[in-house]
Amino acid sequence: MTAIELNPSGTKGFVYTRMLERLSDYQEYQKGWDGEDAAPLNTIVVRNFKKVLLKAKEEYLDAWDIFPAANGSLLLQNKEKKCGINLGKSSFSYYTIKDGKVEGMNNIKFTPTALIKTLEGLSA
C-alpha cells in the first residue's frame, strides 16, 4: 500500500510528512550555511511552500525533492533532475530540460494554485 492508500480520508501521508521534515531542517540553516554567504530560508517562502503542501496531491509531490537556495528561496527539483521550480516570496520560476534544451519561465506570480498547476504539468 502507498501512503495515499493508507489515508483514504484525505489526510496527508508520508510524502507530506517527509517534505515538512526537510523544510523544518532547512529552516535551521543560518546565514553562510553553504560555507560562503548563503541566506537562510526566507520565512515567507516557507509559508508559501506550506500552502502548496496543504493543497497539492501527494502523487505529484512524490516525484520531487526540495533544497534551500543560496538566496533564501526554495528549489523543488524532480528526482530525475530534468526540471525544477524555484519558489520565492512573491513569484516562482521553472525550467525543464528536454533533448538537451533548457526551457522555462521566470517571475510567475505566486499563488498555491499556479505553482501546483506548474508542478503537475512538469510531472506529466
Image (tube, helix red, strand yellow):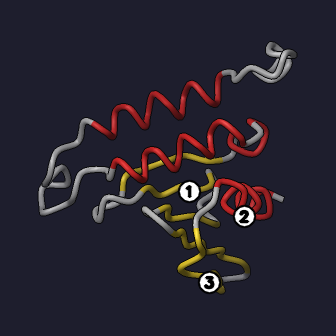
Viewer-closest of 49 and 37: 49
Q: Quadrant of the N terminus?
A: top right
Q: Is residue 38 left or right of residue 119?
A: left
How far, Cα to Cα, is label 3 from label 1?
14 Å
Residue 57 position (above or below residue 4): below
Give the numbered dot on residue 77.
Answer: 1
Residue 30 in percent (x, y) is at 16, 45
Q: Which residue is mark 3?
A: 102
Q: Residues within 10 Å of mark 3 (few under 14, many from 20)?
A: few
Spatial CA span between label 3 and label 2: 16 Å
Q: CA distance from mark 1 to mark 2?
A: 12 Å
Q: Which residue is mark 2?
A: 118
Residue 85 at x, y percent in the picture:
57, 64
Residue 26's place in the image compared with 101, above or below, is above
Amino acid type at circle 2 is Thr
Q: Does residue 83 lie above or below 39 as drawn?
A: below
In terms of secondary structure, where does tag 1 sit? strand
State the residue at coordinates (43%, 62%).
Answer: 89
Tell me the quarter of the image containing the C terminus.
Answer: bottom right
Q: Earlier in the sequence, mark 3 or mark 2?
A: 3
Secondary structure type for disc 3: strand
User: Sequence-wise, which precedes: disc 1 or disc 2?
Assistant: 1
Q: Is residue 96 left or right of residue 3?
A: left
Looking at the picture, which amino acid does disc 1 mark? Gln
Three-letter residue code for mark 3: Val
**For numbered disc 2, what is the local secondary structure?**
helix
**Which residue is drawn at the image coordinates 24% and 51% (left, top)?**
40
